């Protein structure tokens, strides 16, 4: 835990991910499906920022909606949740085969427990419905066209993104995510 004077920036479902200035947590620490783990971990504190890369697709839509409400509750007013998932509209058959619900086949594949593949509309609604204001940072539209807003890596790095992912080089888009910022309004409680 960081001293109270420092911003509390937390990675949810971090796996192997480590980013400077961010506290990595695993499902055993903060389970998006178990509020009691959040109560125990945060106590009276609230997060300034949460970062969550390729985790929400492991929850059903209903679970994802409840998880969005949980994050809202444990963020301070004005706090930011940056969240990335596979994109249902990325027009690449091999990508879609890999990220599909149930994964591509092998039971030990990291995508074997994928429960949903979001498009931008449904994913944004998950967070808007929880009370967040939402900005799409990277996504494919309904025609499969990729869109990217300029966003600051320093405010929450997402590896599977246009700029950071090693598969996106020399004008080739090899692997994208649907990435959004969900901000808790400053006047929310
Ligand atoms: C594909 S891995 C992504 C790991 C890491 N975020 C990354 O981008 O490399 C999915 C992660 O989601 C975590 N996860 C699955 N269900 C979760 C839940 N209910 N609460 C928190 N984390 C969960 C898993 O433990 C795993 O670390």
Image: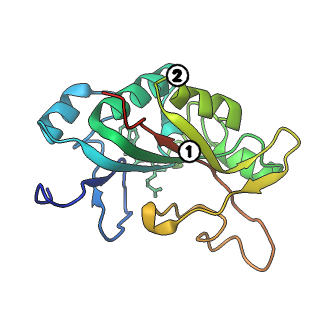
Q: Which mark is residue 84?
A: none
Q: What's the residue at 30%, 55% (across, down)?
A: 9
- Label located before the other in sequence (2 or 1): 1
The image quarter containing residue 122 is top right
The image quarter containing residue 117 is top right
Q: Is residue 76 above or below residue 154?
A: above
Q: Is mark 1 within 8 Å of ligand 1?
A: yes
User: From the viewer's perspective, is 42 left or right of 10?
Assistant: left
Q: Which mark is residue 111?
A: 1
Q: Is residue 114 above or below residue 177?
A: above
Residue density around tag 1, few if under 14, some if 14–19, many if 20 or more, within 10 Å: many
Q: From the top left corner, tell me how far across and down residue 149 is, in percent.
A: 68, 58
Of labels 2 and 1, the one closer to you: 2
Helix or strand or loop: what does disc 2 sit on?
loop
Gap in angstroms between the C-alphas marked 2 and 1: 26 Å
As drawn, the residue found furthest toward the top would be 62
As drawn, the residue found furthest toward the bottom would be 170
- Name the residue nearer the viewer: 11 or 128: 128
Can residue 126 be seen here? yes
Q: From the top left corner, tell me how far across and down residue 97 is, in percent.
A: 73, 45
Can residue 104 be seen here? no
- Figure quadrant of the N terminus: bottom left
Q: What's the residue at 50%, 67% (across, down)?
A: 153
Q: From the top left corner, tell me how far across and down residue 26 is, in percent.
A: 29, 48
The reply to whether the C-beta atoms of the residues labelled 2 and 1 are less than 8 Å apart is: no
- Name the residue nearer the viewer: 56 or 74: 74
Helix or strand or loop: what does disc 1 sit on?
loop
Q: Which mark is residue 129?
A: 2
């Amino acid at each position: 835990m960081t001293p109270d004077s420092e911003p509390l920036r937390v990675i949810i479902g971090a796996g192997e991910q480590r980013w400077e200035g961010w506290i990595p947590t695993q499902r055993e620490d903060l389970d998006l499906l178990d509020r009691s783990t959040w109560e125990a971990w945060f106590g009276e504190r609230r997060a300034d920022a949460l970062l969550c890369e390729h985790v929400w697709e492991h929850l059903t839509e209903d679970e994802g909606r409840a998880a969005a409400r949980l994050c809202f509750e444990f963020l301070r007013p004005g706090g930011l949740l940056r969240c990335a998932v596979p994109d249902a509209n990325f027009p690449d058959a091999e990508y879609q085969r890999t990220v599909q619900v149930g994964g591509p086949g092998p039971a030990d594949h990291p995508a074997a427990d994928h429960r949903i593949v979001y498009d931008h509309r449904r994913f944004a609604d998950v967070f808007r419905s929880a009370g967040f204001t939402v900005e799409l940072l990277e996504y494919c539209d309904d025609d499969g066209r990729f869109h990217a807003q300029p966003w600051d890596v320093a405010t929450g790095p997402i590896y599977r993104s246009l700029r950071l992912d090693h598969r996106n080089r020399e004008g080739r888009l090899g692997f994208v995510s649907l990435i959004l910022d969900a901000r808790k309004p400053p006047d929310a409680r």
